[in-house]
Image (spheres, rainbow, N blue to C red):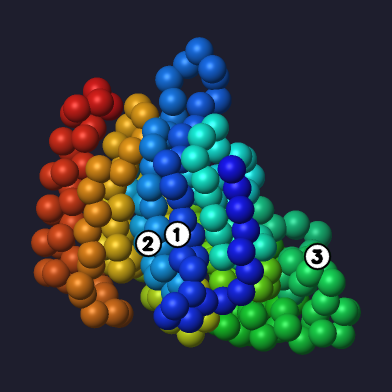
Amino acid sequence: MLARTTGRGGEDAAPAVRAEGVSQTFDRRGPAVLDGVDLTVAPGEFVCLLGASGCGKSTLLNLIAGLNRPTAGRVTVAADRPALMFQEPALLPWLTAAGNVELALKARGVGRPERRAEAGRLLRVVNLGGQSDKRPHELSGGMRQRVALARALAQGSSVLLMDEPFAALDAITRDVLHEELIRVWTEQRLAVVFVTHNVREAVRLAQRVVLMSSRPGRIVREWSVDLAQPRAIESPGVGALATEITAQLHQEISRHGH
């Protein structure tokens, strides 16, 4: 079952995301992809889902996004339509950066003059104010992902879902975009659910890291990240917690034969 509640929450508001007893099976005769997943994300919280490839991270994200319905259990989201950002920016090549952002605004029914102004504002939010007239092929990979982030923000949702959005980028560009994402998250007060298999990335970004097992996907452990932002990916605190989480991840991988 999938439910939607509307409105940005305050301290006493409903969770931004809640999964209760969520299971997912794509083949009735095959094994479950997810089994009995319980997850709650508070308004404004940044949570990273971490696990080996094939553990069901993206499947859970798609259920939260409403792209699929769970076989069993319930997903509740405090937004009519969560914003979703994928690993690939998926920009329309014949549109400018501003034009790609305006598509999301048009889908919300925003008028043309307002769309143009708001697209420009959102591109400035992601530090692309001078690139609004450039087409995707004129932008670097990191810039294209910034456009994709601006387009996600244009959806006006209080919940942002991110499926390994920086995995294909080089280390330096990824580091810069980590900083940009934390700044945008702080300013926009979004609830973020971020899927990754990169342990240091999870610790660098999240307030809470959630580790999933495989076959079927279950939540096996969570860590609160009590490190002040902004964090450097090479900092001792990030490294120490990443080492602890990595050891647990290796145990899960060994247990399930990955």
Circle 3 SS class: helix
Type of amino acid at the residue the image marks with label 2: Val
User: Could you say which disc has been placed on residue 47 in the image?
Assistant: 2
Q: Mark 3 sits on what residue?
A: 107
Type of amino acid at the residue the image marks with label 1: Val
Q: Residue visible at 87% across and 79% down?
A: 111
Q: Mark 1 sits on what residue?
A: 193
The outermost residue toward the right is 112
Q: Residue 106 location, x and y as percent?
A: 82, 69
Type of amino acid at the residue the image marks with label 3: Ala
Circle 2 SS class: strand
Of mark 3 and mark 1, the one earlier in the sequence is 3
Please tell me in which quadrant of the rendered image residue 80 appears. bottom right
User: Could you say which disc has been placed on residue 166 in the image?
Assistant: none
Q: Is residue 130 visible?
A: no
Q: Quadrant of the C terminus?
A: top left
* Cα separation between marks 1 and 2: 5 Å
Q: Left or right: 229 with respect to 41?
A: left
The outermost residue toward the front is 12
| Foreground residue among 8 and 115 | 8
Could you tell me if the residues under marks 1 and 2 are in contact, i.e. CB atoms within 8 Å?
yes
Q: Eyeballing the image, is 70 above or below 116? A: above
